[in-house]
Image (spheres, rainbow, N blue to C red):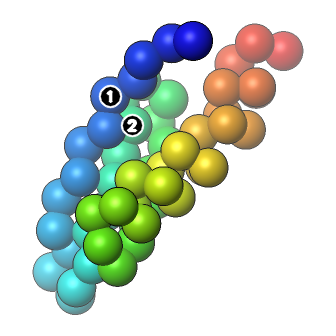
Amino acid sequence: MSVLSAVIIPDLDGGYVSQNPETGTTSQGETIDEALSNLKEGKRPSIDLLYI
């Protein structure tokens, strides 16, 4: 299992934006936990595409 970075920043309109610099995946959520969870869900297809 690989370990990837997550950058989480507050959004000016509320909530949080989460980014994974290694895959370029970006997501968002109302809370930090939600933003991180959404990022984890969103990076799976990106990683699959990298290895095809």
Look at the numbered discs 1 and 2 and tell me whether their residues touch, using CB distance below 8 Å.
yes
For disc 1, the neighbor class at 10 Å (few under 14, some 14 to 19, many from 20) is few
**Which quadrant would the N terminus be assigned to in this image?**
top right
Q: Which of these two is toward me, 40 or 20? A: 40
Give coordinates of residue 8: x percent, y percent: 23, 52
Among the two numbered marks 1 and 2 on one chain, the one whose residue lies closer to the N terminus: 1
- When asked about the image quadrant of residue 16, the answer is bottom left
Q: Is residue 1 left or right of residue 36?
A: right
Q: Is residue 9 left or right of residue 18?
A: left
Give coordinates of residue 27: x percent, y percent: 46, 59
Q: Is residue 31 left or right of residue 26?
A: left
- Mark 1: which secondary structure? loop
- Mark 2: which secondary structure? strand
Mark number displayed over residue 5: 1
Above or below, 49 against 17 in this view is above
Kindly report the distance in space between the C-alpha atoms of the residues bearing marks 1 and 2.
6 Å
The residue singled out by tag 2 in the image is 20
**Which quadrant would the C terminus be assigned to in this image?**
top right
Mark number displayed over residue 50: none
